[in-house]
Image (cartoon, rainbow, N blue to C red):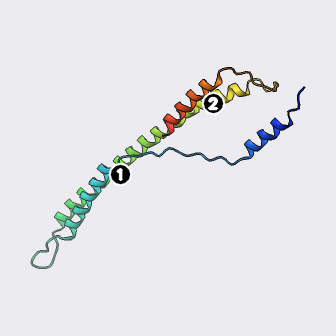
Amino acid sequence: MPDLTPLSNKLDEILAKETTVNAPEVNVDLSAIEEKLEQLDVTVGEVRDLDFDGDGTVDFGDINNILTDLLQRQENQEAELDAKKAEFDDFKKNKLKALENLIIPLLKNLKSNPDKNYIHWPNRAGILDAQITKILGLTR
């Protein structure tokens, strides 16, 4: 049997190296929410600028109506934000599941015959290049 010490040492060296994972950058369009928040800010300014009656009192009927409107707008904004968060979570979950489906079969195949010292895998370069391309397609 050939001496596998150099190969084993090289494998230990590769496995000992620190690896980093570059997570894909995900861009979520929040411009609609930002626009609505700006509109809400304008309405808050309108509330602050309420006219006083000649006797220095404020018409609370108008304030109540405006406050109700503001609270409704806030609830709508929160619902939209929750929907965007859920959409992003689904997007992230689907991307990670697709990545898992590309990597796990490869690792299982590599593990399939642990008692053998060598892996017989002819024409693997093409297969590995295809997997790399698929993974990069998901993460970039």
Q: Position of residue 19 (x, y in %)?
A: 65, 46
Residue displayed at 31% across by 50% down: 31
Q: How many labels does the image show?
A: 2
Please indicate, yes or no, whether residue 20 appears anywhere in the rendered image: yes
Q: Position of residue 95 (x, y in %)?
A: 50, 36
Relative horizontal placement of residue 18, taking residue 134 as reference (left or right): right
Q: Earlier in the sequence, mark 1 or mark 2?
A: 1
Please indicate, yes or no, whether residue 101 appears anywhere in the rendered image: no
Q: Position of residue 53 (x, y in %)?
A: 11, 74
Relative horizontal placement of residue 8, taking residue 127 as reference (left or right): right
Residue position marked by numbered label 2 in the rendering: 104
Residue displayed at 43% across by 43% down: 88
Relative horizontal placement of residue 139, taking residue 119 as reference (left or right): left
- Front in this rendered view, residue 87 or 73: 87
Residues packed near mark 2 inside 10 Å, few (<14), some (14 to 19) or many (20 plus) = few
Residue sticking out furthest to the left = 54
Relative horizontal placement of residue 94, taking residue 48 as reference (left or right): right
Residues packed near mark 1 inside 10 Å, few (<14), some (14 to 19) or many (20 plus) = few
Q: Which amino acid does label 2 sit on?
A: Ile
Image depth: mark 1 or mark 2 in front: 2
Q: What residue type is labelled 1?
A: Glu
In whole angstroms, how far apart are the C-alphas of marks 1 and 2?
38 Å
Residue sticking out furthest to the bottom = 55
Residue position marked by numbered label 1 in the rendering: 78
Q: Is mark 2 on a helix, strand or loop?
A: helix
